Amino acid sequence: MRTYIGRHLAVTTDEFAELALGTPVELWLGVEGENEQERAARLDAARDILADDPDLPDDLIRMAAQVIEENPDLFDAVPLTRPIRRRTARKGVAA
C-alpha cells in the first residue's frame, strides 16, 4: 500500500509525518548531539511555527490518534532477547 500526502509519496514514517505536518520531525524532536545553542534555535523556530498556527498541536494529536486507530499493530512490542556472551578461556600466564 502506498501513502500519498498531496502529490508526494511518503515512503518512511518520518516522511509521512514531515509531509503531514509541513515541517521536519527533527524540528520537534531534536537531533542527537545538538548543543545548547542549536537546541535554543530549534525551539525558537518551533515557537514561531506554533504562533503562526495555534491549531497545529490539536491537528497533530488528531493525526496521531488516527494513525494509532488505523494501525494498532505498530505498538505490538516484543522484547528482544540478548545473546549470551561466552567467555573464552585465556591460555598463558599474565605478565
Image: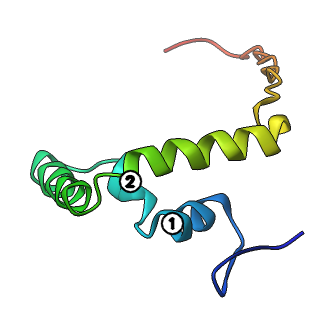
Q: Where is residue 70 in the image (x, y as percent from the top left)?
A: 81, 45
User: Which circle marks residue 31 in the picture?
Assistant: none
Observer able to see residue 10: yes
Residue 31 seen in the current view = no
Can you tell which mark lies on residue 56? 2
- SS type, badge 2: helix
Q: Which residue is drawn at 66% across and 87% down?
A: 7
Query: From the viewer's perspective, is residue 17 above or below residue 3?
Result: above
Where, quadrant-wise, is the N terminus in this rendering? bottom right
**The disc labelled 2 sits on which kind of residue?**
Leu
Q: Which amino acid does label 1 sit on?
A: Glu
Q: Name the residue under label 1.
A: 18
> Is 5 in front, or is 30?
5
Residue reaching furthest bottom? 7
Q: How far apart are marks 2 and 1 (CA)?
A: 13 Å
Q: Nearer the viewer, residue 8 or 63?
A: 63
Q: Which residue is painted at 19% across and 49% down in the image?
A: 39
Q: Nearer the viewer, residue 22 or 55?
A: 55
Who comes first in sequence, dot 2 or dot 1? Answer: 1
